[in-house]
Amino acid sequence: MILLGLDPGLRATGWGVISLDEGRLRHIANGTIRTQLKTTLAERLCEIFRGVVDVVERHAPDSAAIEETFVNKNPNSTLKLGQARGVAMLAPATMGIPVGEYAANLVKKTVVGAGHADKNQIQMMVSHLLPGVSIDSSDSADALAVAICHGHHLPTKNLSWQQAVAGAQ
């Protein structure tokens, strides 16, 4: 089964693709979709959408997962992050790919063992769990962590495990 993890952001959206085969994880690809800071919000959201669509077309994941939005002190920043997240979710969903959602603390706890792990700990554990991986950025490391979390929790999610497995065949 091919899994896509997404770590949404308006400036940088990380993505990571892994395979899960009989409980074994293998890195396929990862990267970062960077938007142009001097463009409008609508144009940046289009860049994110097109970037995620491109990743989905290139790697044909069976399922995707995204980190849930956390609330910042600045409500405007939270709103913009939510818009980026919505666009990132929309891309695989419009292509018929189920999308799971995970709280940041659950992703960290699944990958590192602690719900308040920092970015360095996440990157180190992703490198350990996916030997030989060359991580594009901290955003793509986070996205790979989301994909790993998804692989561990997919059987218990409301995403019809049988449907996801059937799609992989």
Image (spheres, rainbow, N blue to C red):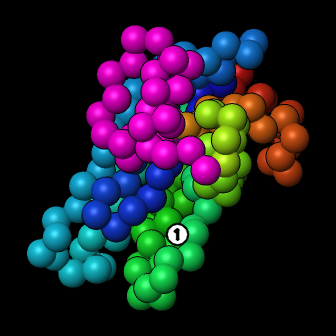
Packing grade of label 1 (10 A; few <14, some 14-19, many >=20) is some
**Outermost residue, left direction?**
38
Asked whether the viewer can see residue 62, the reply is no
Dominant secondary structure, magenta: helix
Q: Residue at the location (56% across, 76% down)?
A: 71
Q: Is residue 155 magenta?
A: no
Residue 76 at x, y = what percent? 42, 88
Closer to us: 21 or 136: 136
Q: Quadrant of residue 63?
A: top right
Residue 79 at x, y = what percent? 47, 83
Q: Does residue 168 appear to the left or right of 31 in the view shown?
A: right
User: Which quadrant of the rendered structure holds the C terminus?
Assistant: top right
125 w.r.t. 102: above or below: above
Kind of residue indicated by mark 1 = Gly
Q: Residue at the location (62% across, 34% down)?
A: 112
Closer to us: 115 or 163: 115
Q: Quadrant of residue 40?
A: bottom left
Q: Residue at the location (31% across, 57% down)?
A: 12
The residue carrying mark 1 is 86
Asked whether the viewer can see residue 42, the reply is yes
Closer to us: 101 or 106: 106
Q: Secondary structure at mark 1?
A: helix
Residue 90 at x, y = what percent? 53, 63
Q: Does residue 5 appear to the left or right of 9 in the view shown?
A: right
Q: Residue at the location (67% across, 48% down)?
A: 115
Which stretch appears magenta? 116-144
User: Which quadrant of the rendered structure holds the N terminus?
Assistant: top right
142 w.r.t. 112: above or below: below
Q: Is residue 140 magenta?
A: yes
